[in-house]
Image (cartoon, rainbow, N blue to C red):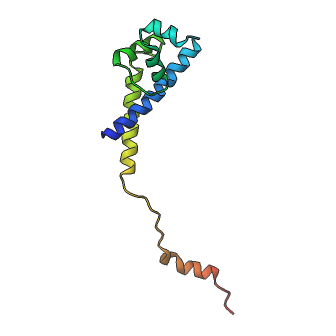
Amino acid sequence: MSDDSDSLGLRAALSIFGDMVQRRRQASRWSFLELSEKTGIEIAALSDLEQGREALSEAAIERVSEFLGLGPDVFSKLLRNERIKAANRAAASNDGPREIVVDIARYRESWQETTSQPKD
């Protein structure tokens, strides 16, 4: 995989994971302070994580995931899937430009027959 698809996959996985963390935290009615105290992760880092801006260490991500009941490997699965999607999109776009070319000569005769004036 290319660096671009890895980077795109990471950004997508962070965004999805951040949304999951935010929904779980809010459903549990925990503030950032409470979640920070329970997981030992700084408030600013948790906020960045929810916004999809920054990845925490693997251990910190697992701690948050397990604490919120998401499972310890949810982020690694998201990351793998999003990198595969990004690589597939990149491969599909590298097939070359897809231009629609119509061979008018092929259709000209039948078109002229249907659109020309009636013969006397």
Residue nearest the observer in this picture, 50 or 62: 50
| 45 and 76: which is toward the camera | 45
The quadrant of the rendering that contains the N terminus is top left
Task: Count numbered badges in the picture.
Answer: 0
Residue at 46% over, 18% down = 44
Residue at the front extreme? Answer: 44
Q: Position of residue 26 (x, y in %)?
A: 57, 16
**Residue 36 location (% of width, % of height):** 46, 10
- The structure residue drawn at horizontal position 43% and vertical position 12%, both measured from the top left corner, is 66
Query: Where is residue 75 drawn, in percent x and y?
Result: 40, 23
Q: For the C terminus, give its image quadrant.
A: bottom right
Point out the residue furthest to the top here.
38
Taking the image as shown, residue 8 lies to the left or right of residue 109, namely: left
Q: Identify the residue at horizontal 46%, vertical 27% (top origin).
A: 52
Please name whichever residue, 34 or 69, is drawn nearer the observer in this view of the structure.
34
- Spot occupied by residue 54 in the image (x, y as percentages of width and height): 41, 25
Residue for point 55% across, 10% down? 30
**Closer to the camera, 22 or 87?**
22
- The answer to which quarter of the image holds residue 81 is top left
Rendering quarter of residue 39: top left
Residue at the limit of the structure toward the bottom, as seen here: 120
